[in-house]
Image: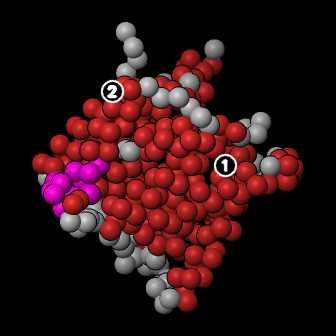
């Protein structure tokens, strides 16, 4: 009865908005804090906060970690360390609007990986939706010039973002094999794995002389990343899923590129080109075709 007092649609909309903050923060972080320091600092902050929240369950979490060691490590490294590392590196090579739009291809990668890993059967309608979605992202990575795809003149940041999406899709599909453990405690374990997994990248960044200490603005940006996309978005999404289920909740992630585009224009003064609009329309058309139930 108590959960009826909550508005899951508001929760899920806010979660998508906070995930949109991630692309903006990634762009603002350029020259303010080095990419791998963001990843390490992000998961260090999340780890500390969640450890305090779950302090009475940490022993249980350690037992679950030992029992599912291989799965935990693969999921933590794919969904948190690798995804975020590539994400913030790609933010140095493309604009925030593109980051948000390319990220909207995640459902397509999830389905493809599910098809090979979990032997999920997809129908013609879903295949058509996937193809339309990829056309949409092709418009973005080619800056509206699809002919450039044939000349292989693509934006490196957008291509990196596609690889980031693939790693997160592996994580999302792998969650179907998750052990029986509450969401926040599971996320606490992942934050430990993500933090440890980020250290080699940080060391490489230091040895390559690309590491630099954050400015005051960099520390503020890191704090925003820890609080909004890392904590609040995850908690709000969990609450939404608990009330209305994962399928309907998942559709709200389609709002991320819209929020990212609006925020990029307002905060970063980025230009919104006609090919961005066309790309969004095509991607949402693909998602609509893919998710549309048979009448």
Q: Residue at x 56, y 32 (%)?
A: 120
Report crowding for label 1: few under 14, some 14 to 19, many 20 or more residues within 10 A (C-alpha): many
**In what quadrant of the picture does the C terminus appear?**
top left
Task: Check the image and report above or below for 4 versus 38.
Answer: above
Residue 10 visible within the image? no
Residue positioned 12% across, 48% down in the render: 274
Residue 111, given in percent of the width and then of the height, sits at 49, 38
SS at mark 2 in the image: helix
For residue 142: magenta?
Answer: yes
Give the label, 2 or 1, closer to the camera. Answer: 2
Along the line of sight, which residue is nearer the eye, 269 or 177? 177
| Residue on which the image places disc 1 | 187
Residue 163 in the image, given as x and y percentages of width and height: 45, 59
Q: Which residues are magenta?
A: 136-148
The label on residue 44 is none
Q: How crowded is the residue under tag 2: few (<14 C-alpha within 10 Å), some, or many (20+)?
A: some
Compared across the picture, whether 53 is left or right of 135 comes to right
Chief secondary structure of the magenta portion: helix
Residue 50 is left or right of residue 287, and the answer is right
Mark found first going from the N terminus, 2 or 1: 1
Would you say residue 262 sits in the magenta stretch?
A: no
Residue occupying image coordinates x 22% and y 45%: 279
Q: Which residue is mark 2?
A: 289
In the picture as drawn, the residue positioned furthest to the top comes out as 295
Whole-Å distance between the Cαs marked 2 and 1? 32 Å
- Residue 48 image offset from top left, x and y in percent: 68, 60
């Amino acid at each position: 009865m108590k959960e009826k007092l909550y508005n899951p649609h508001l929760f899920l909309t806010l979660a998508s908005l906070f995930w949109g903050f991630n692309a903006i923060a990634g762009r603002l972080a350029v020259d303010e804090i080095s990419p791998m320091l963001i990843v390490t600092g992000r998961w260090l902050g999340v780890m500390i906060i969640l450890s305090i929240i779950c302090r009475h369950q940490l022993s249980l979490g350690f037992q679950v970690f030992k029992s599912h060691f291989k799965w935990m490590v693969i999921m933590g490294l794919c969904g948190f360390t690798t995804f975020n590392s590539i994400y913030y590196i790609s933010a140095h090579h493309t604009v925030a609007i593109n980051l948000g739009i390319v990220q909207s291809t995640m459902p397509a990668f999830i389905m493809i990986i599910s098809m090979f890993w979990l032997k999920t059967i997809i129908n013609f309608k879903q295949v058509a939706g996937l193809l339309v979605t990829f056309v949409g992202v092709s418009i973005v990575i080619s800056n509206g010039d699809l002919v450039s795809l044939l000349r292989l003149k693509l934006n490196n940041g957008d291509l990196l973002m596609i690889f980031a999406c693939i790693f997160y899709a592996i994580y999302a599909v792998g969650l179907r094999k998750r052990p029986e453990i509450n969401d926040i405690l599971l996320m606490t374990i992942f934050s430990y794995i993500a933090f440890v997994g980020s250290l080699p990248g940080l060391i490489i960044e230091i040895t390559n002389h690309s590491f630099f200490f954050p400015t005051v603005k960099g520390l503020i940006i890191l704090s925003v990343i820890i609080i909004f996309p890392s904590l609040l978005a995850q908690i709000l999404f969990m609450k939404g899923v608990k009330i209305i289920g994962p399928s309907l909740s998942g559709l709200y992630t389609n709002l991320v590129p819209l929020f990212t585009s609006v925020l990029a224009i307002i905060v970063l003064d980025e230009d919104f080109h006609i090919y961005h609009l066309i790309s969004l329309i095509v991607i949402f058309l693909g998602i609509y075709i893919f998710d549309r139930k048979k009448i």
